Every structure is written in structure tokens, then in C-alpha cells.
Image (cartoon, rainbow, N blue to C red):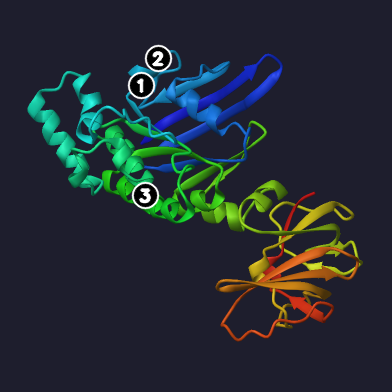
């Protein structure tokens, strides 16, 4: 069942396009992340769904109803913000109970719902405390509990983990996903953090300059990017300039010819980009169908469980190779000559 449907939704501020015409369907129970750099249009899109921003054109449908002109408060949505928006003078119980009180629910039903949701977020022991007595992670879970308690149709979250440190942010990613799956609720989530999006999402809509660059699963965006922007934004990438030299073959700027895979038809002489993820490259020759290039080591860095090698191809192009570290890797020295190789299917052609 389609939970949210956007039909040619756009937002302009005079001549400035904040959001180009966008079509999007979100299914019931889906975790969809709006991902992109600052100013890409992701928060504008979320605010149009919430009703906080009026679109310049297009339609917003929720649960099969056109809500384009329906006020935000009447859309049945829940919102969670980075700032938590907890009321400091109230206890945690009172904070969570507040949206139920303004809806006029009986006192006993409010008590039961608040206690149930505190159990759900695994914080029943903090009911009598004030927000300032809780950690950042606990406050975020309470903000989510306050949202869940009145059974919203959809939960919208705008950079909710931005104020947390890395370790706590990773813990909260798992916690939010656990709750979303357990409740089966539809969630639209805004972030600029691609690791966060890859960890939590069923699908990702990657925004760029007000447009949806690509919509797909995390695996689709990582392994099948449709542009250099997507390839570079999701994970680490090596993007090599090349021209089409024949069927399944391209010529790099240094004159080397390599075999590639591609989805769209290619024309001889066409300028393209070749995507090689750092982890598919090897500092040794493998049975790669002729895909090997000579390079010079410029430096190596041990980063926990991986070793990153920074290379320069003949011709001056920089390339990153990432390998697993077993603690005994003898890293090549700067200036060493090496051969890098990869399997044919791991070199992907993208538009230039």
C-alpha cells in the first residue's frame, strides 16, 4: 500500500529552485531516507510532506487522500527534530503525555500509553526525571517516544542524531531502526550522513541541487550508481576519465585500454567516467581478463582493520586502494612500483 505519494511537487522562491518537480511513492512500513549535502533540497521535501512548507506546484497524498492544502497539524504525522524539543520544566512522563492530553484522552489511558512507550524505548526508569537529567541519547529516545505515543500515520525525522557523538549516533541508528521495524511504521528520515543512510534505510533518495539524483536501495546506490555524483557521495570511489574505444572497452587518459561493464549503449569516442571502488582493487595481479595498471605508491595509512594505499597511475591520475589488514601487512614504501588489478565486472562506466 502506498503511504505517501508526491506528484510533480516543487518549491520555488522567486527564480530560485529549492526543489525541482519530484515524483515519489513511499510504501507502508518503509524506511525512506532523504540524503544529500547541505542545500540539496532534502529538508524542503520533508517539510512539504509535513505541511510546514507549501509547495509551489504539485500534489501531496497521504493514505490515499490529497493533503496538499491540509494544515500540518491535521495530517496525522509525527515529527522528531535534532533539538529534541523536550519541555525542560516537565518530567519525562509529562513530556510524553502532553500530545495525548491535548487530544483529550482519559487520564488512565494516557498513563497506560506513556508507560507502554517508555518500555518500548527501554527507559521506564526515567519517567520522573527532567530532560536535563538525561544523556543526549536518552533525550532522543524520549523525543521518539513522545512521537510514537499518539500513533502517527508516519514519522518524519530531520537530522535527529546530528548532535550526538559518533559512538552514540551509531547506537541510536540501530535503536531507531529496531523501533521502526517492531512497530511497522512508515518513516521519512533526513540526513547528510551517507553511512547513517546506508545503515538504516530500505530505500534512499539522494538529492542534489534540488533534484532527486537517484532513488534505490543502499546496495543499488553503492553498486549501481547512475552518475559520478552518486558514486562519489556514497562510499569512496576512484573515478577515471576515459573515452570509449570499442565494445566493452575504454581508453584511459594515459592510453591504457581496459575492459568495463555498462548498462547504457556507448558510442565510439564518447567521453565517460570509469568507477572503481577502492576495495575491488588489488596490489597484485589476479586473473582479471587483462585489467591491470602500473602505478607508483605515494603513501599508505593503516586505518583500523584496513590499509589504504594512495597511488599514482602512469599519467598522473590518483587512485585509492583499500585492503583488509591482518596486522602483518608489509606496506610498500613511497616510490615503489606496483601493479593494480581487478575483475572485469567491477569496473563500471558512468556518464562523463
Residue that badge 1 annotates:
75
Q: Where is residue 307 drawn, in percent x and y?
A: 64, 74
**What whole-number distance in Å separates the C-alpha atoms at marks 3 and 2?**
29 Å
Which numbered dot is residue 177?
A: 3
Q: Secondary structure at mark 3?
A: helix
Q: Answer yes or no: do the residues labelled 1 and 2 have beta carbons within 8 Å? A: yes
84 relative to 94 in the view: left or right: right
Residue that badge 2 annotates:
70
**What whole-number distance in Å separates the C-alpha atoms at marks 3 and 1?**
23 Å
In the depicted view, which residue is nearer to us: 308 or 284? 308
In the depicted view, which residue is nearer to us: 192 or 205? 192
Of marks 1 and 2, which one's residue comes earlier in the chain? 2
Is residue 52 placed above or below 201 in the rendered structure?
Answer: above
- Of badges 3 and 1, the one in the foreground is 3
Q: Quadrant of residue 104?
A: top left
Of marks 3 and 1, which one's residue comes earlier in the chain? 1
In the depicted view, which residue is nearer to us: 94 or 64? 94
Is residue 184 placed above or below 294 in the rendered structure?
Answer: above
Label 3 crowding class (10 Å Cα cut-off): few <14, some 14-19, many 20+?
Answer: some
225 relative to 340 in the view: left or right: left
Q: Where is residue 306 drawn, in percent x and y?
A: 59, 73
What residue is at 46 percent from the left and 20 percent from the top? 52
**What whole-number distance in Å separates the C-alpha atoms at marks 1 and 2?**
7 Å
Q: Secondary structure at mark 2?
A: loop
Q: Where is residue 54 drawn, in percent x and y?
A: 51, 16
Q: Quadrant of residue 260?
A: bottom right
Of marks 3 and 2, which one's residue comes earlier in the chain? 2
Amino acid at each position: 500500500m502506498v503511504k505517501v505519494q508526491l506528484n510533480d511537487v516543487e518549491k520555488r522562491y522567486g527564480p530560485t529552485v529549492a526543489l525541482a518537480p519530484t515524483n515519489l511513492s513511499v510504501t507502508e512500513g518503509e524506511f525512506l531516507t532523504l540524503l544529500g549535502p547541505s542545500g540539496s533540497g532534502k529538508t524542503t521535501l520533508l517539510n512539504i510532506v509535513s505541511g510546514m512548507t507549501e509547495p509551489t506546484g504539485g500534489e501531496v497524498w497521504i493514505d490515499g487522500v490529497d493533503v496538499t492544502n491540509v494544515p500540518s497539524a491535521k495530517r496525522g504525522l509525527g515529527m522528531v527534530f535534532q533539538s529534541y524539543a523536550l519541555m525542560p520544566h516537565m518530567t519525562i512522563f509529562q513530556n510524553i503525555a502532553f500530545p495525548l492530553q491535548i487530544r483529550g484522552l482519559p487520564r488512565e489511558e494516557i498513563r497506560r500509553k506513556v508507560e507502554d512507550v517508555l518500555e518500548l524505548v527501554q527507559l521506564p526508569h526515567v519517567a520522573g526525571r527532567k530532560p536535563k537529567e538525561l544523556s543526549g541519547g536518552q533525550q532522543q529516545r524520549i523525543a521518539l517516544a513522545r512521537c510514537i505515543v499518539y500513533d502517527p500515520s508516519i514519522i518524519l525525522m530531520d537530522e535527529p542524531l546530528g548532535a550526538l557523538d559518533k559512538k552514540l549516533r551509531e547506537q541510536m541508528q540501530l535503536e531507531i531502526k529496531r523501533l521502526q521495524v517492531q512497530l511497522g511504521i512508515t518513516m521519512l528520515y533526513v540526513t547528510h550522513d551517507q553511512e547513517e543512510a546506508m545503515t538504516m534505510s530500505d530505500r534512499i533518495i539522494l538529492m542534489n541541487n534540488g533534484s532527486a539524483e537517484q532513488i534505490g536501495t543502499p546496495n543499488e546506490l553503492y553498486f549501481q550508481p547512475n552518475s559520478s555524483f552518486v558514486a562519489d557521495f556514497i562510499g569512496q570511489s576512484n573515478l577515471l576519465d576515459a573515452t570509449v574505444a570499442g565494445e566493452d572497452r575504454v581508453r584511459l587518459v594515459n592510453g591504457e585500454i581496459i575492459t568495463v561493464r555498462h548498462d547504457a549503449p556507448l558510442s565510439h569516442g564518447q567521453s565517460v567516467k570509469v568507477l572503481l571502488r577502492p576495495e575491488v582493487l588489488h596490489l597484485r595481479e589476479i586473473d582479471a581478463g587483462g585489467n591491470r595498471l602500473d602505478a607508483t605508491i605515494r603513501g599508505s595509512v593503516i586505518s583500523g582493520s584496513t590499509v589504504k594505499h594512495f597511488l599514482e597511475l602512469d599519467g598522473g591520475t590518483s587512485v585509492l586502494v583499500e585492503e583488509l589488514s591482518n596486522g602483518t601487512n608489509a606496506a610498500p614504501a613511497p616510490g615503489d612500483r606496483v601493479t593494480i588489478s581487478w575483475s572485469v565486472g567491477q569496473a563500471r562506466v558512468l556518464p562523463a
